[in-house]
Image (cartoon, grey):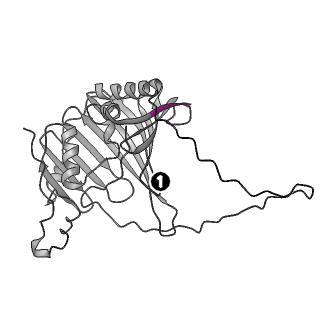
Amino acid sequence: MRVGPVRPAPFFRHVLLLALSAVLTASANAQQSPTAPAPTAPSSPAAPAKVEPTLEPKALEVLKASSSRLAAARTMSFTAVVSYESPSRPGPPLVYTTRSEVTLERPNKLRVITPGDGPASEFYYDGKTVMAFAPAENLVAIADAPRTIDATLEAAYHYAATYFPFTDVMVADPYKDIADAAELAFYIGRSRTVGGTTTDMVAYAVHGVFIQVWIGTADKLPRRARAVYRDDPLRLRHQVDFSDWKLGVATPVGAFTSVRAAKAKQIPFAHPDPAPLPAGAPPSQAAPPAAGTPSKDK
C-alpha cells in the first residue's frame, strides 16, 4: 500500500493561503558542578550504522493478507481522510485535509465523492465513461474510459493529473507493487489506539517511499497509512485514515453516474497545467498542451 502525493483533480486546484503563528523556541543551559572536571573537546559523532535492507516474513505476511482481503471483495466502500503537509512561508509545514467517500464494484465501477476542505469534487466511472465534476462551479469533464478500474485510474492521472492517495487499496492486486519493488519491510508490533481496533503495524519502502501502515489484526483491513518520500528534502508527511469499511455489500442502482454532473457545463478532460515550452523554442514552435481523452482498451 502506497500513499501518494495529493494531486488535485483538473479544475479543482486552488490557491492555499499560508498562515502560521510564530514558533517559539527555548533552550536550557546545562548546569555544571564546580567540582566537575574541565570539559574535553567533543569527539566527532560516529557515523550511524548502515542498516541492510531486509524483507521480514512477518511483515510481508501481514501486507499480503490485507491485500488478499481487499482483492477478493467484489464490492467495497470506505471513507478516506487524507492529511498532507505543505510548506509554509515561515518554513514549518502546514497540514491540509480532504475527506473522500469511496464506492467501487469490480472490475469496472468507481465513485469518489470529496466534500472536504477546499473545493468539492465528484468522480464517476461506470465502466464506459468517466466524469470529473466540480459541483460548486457546475463544471464537468467527461471522457470515454478503459474497461477496468486500474486502467481508468492510470488514464485519469496521465491525461488529467487526477490522482487519489488511496489508489492502492482499490486496484485489482494491491500486493503486486509491493512484491515487485519492496526495498525493505519489517514488523513493528501491535497498536490498540488506531481505528478503534487492534492493528498490526508494518513499515516498508517501495519506489523511494517509506510507509508505515496499521492493518486490522482480525479483519485485515487498513486503518491508517503514513508516508514520507525519501528524496523529499523537507520530509513532508502524507497520511490516510480509513474507516467505515463495507465489503461485499450490494451497491445502489445508479451509484456510478450522476444526472446532475452529466448536465453541467463541459470542459476538456485534460491536464490542468499547460505543457512547458521546448527549450529555446518560440511560442509559435511550441508543442500544444498535453490534452485528450483516455482511449479504450483494445
Q: Position of residue 188 (x, y in %)?
A: 53, 32
Residue at image position (38%, 53%) is 116
Residue at image position (44%, 35%) is 184
Numbered range of the magenta stretch: 185-196
Residue 186 shown in magenta: yes
Q: Position of residue 171 (x, y in %)?
A: 27, 35
Q: Nearer the viewer, residue 76 or 212?
A: 212
Q: Nearer the viewer, residue 156 or 252?
A: 156
Residue 121 shown in magenta: no
Q: Nearer the viewer, residue 278 or 200?
A: 278
Residue found farthest to the right = 35
**Is residue 255 at all visible to an observer of this figure?**
no
| Amino acid type assigned to the residue bearing label 1 in the image | Arg
Read off the residue under disc 1.
235
Q: Quadrant of residue 223?
A: top left
Q: Is residue 215 left or right of residue 161?
A: right
Q: Position of residue 126 (x, y in %)?
A: 16, 40
Q: Position of residue 25 (x, y in %)?
A: 66, 64
**Mark 1 surroundings: few (<14), some (14-19) or many (≥20) residues within 10 A:** few
Residue at image position (25%, 32%) is 172
The quadrant the C terminus occupies is top left
The quadrant the N terminus occupies is top left
Task: Describe the element under mark 1 as helix, strand or loop.
Answer: loop
**Is residue 284 at all visible to an observer of this figure?**
yes
Q: Quadrant of residue 70?
A: top left
Residue found farthest to the left = 298
